[in-house]
Image (cartoon, rainbow, N blue to C red):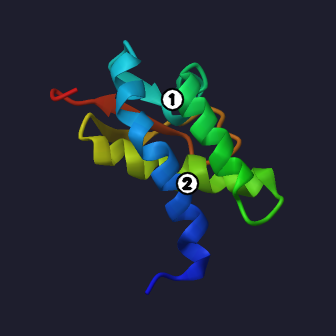
Amino acid sequence: MRDPKEEPIIEATELLRPHIGSVVRRINVDEFTTVEFVEVMQTDDACHTAYLQALDRWPESDETLAKMVIHGQVIPELLRATGQVEWAGYAHGEEDAYAVPAWWRKTESS
């Protein structure tokens, strides 16, 4: 049985899952930050719509909290699940208003 507290995270994950791999493939650099990834997500109409739906369906009306979970948990989980990138370390000196700044590196399979 699922924990009801996890439902918004599961729903956000399922909304974004179909779009993450194609966004990674569109990125033309070997390394990028989570913030840069979110910026590219916003240029893909379907992914942007899914992102907004995930925010709109968040149970609390606190958009900052929703973005913290989506940027800090959901997106990193989905990036890893693509098999196209790997976590490349903390992005020291980079600004990220919603999560710990992180670098991602494309893998050979991407």
Of the residues under marks 1 and 2, which one precedes in the sequence? 2
Question: Percent from the top left, x then y, of residue 20?
Answer: 41, 36
**Which residue in the structure is indicated by mark 2?**
12
Compared with residue 61, is residue 5 higher up or lower down, i.e. above or below? below
Q: Count neighbours of disc 2 (C-alpha within 10 A) and say few if under 14, some if 14 to 19, many if 20 or more.
A: many
Rendered residue at 55%/62% (across/down):
9
Element at label 1? helix
Question: Percent from the top left, x then y, of residue 58?
Answer: 70, 59
- Horizontally, residue 48 falls left or right of residue 57, namely left
Task: Residue at the far bottom: name it.
Answer: 1
Compared with residue 61, is residue 37 higher up or lower down, i.e. above or below? above
Task: Residue at the far right: name it.
Answer: 61
Image quarter of the N terminus: bottom left
User: Mark 1 belongs to which amino acid?
Assistant: Phe
**Which residue in the structure is indicated by mark 1?**
37
* Quarter of the figure with residue 110: top left
- Horizontally, residue 39 falls left or right of residue 88, namely right
User: Mark 2 belongs to which amino acid?
Assistant: Ala
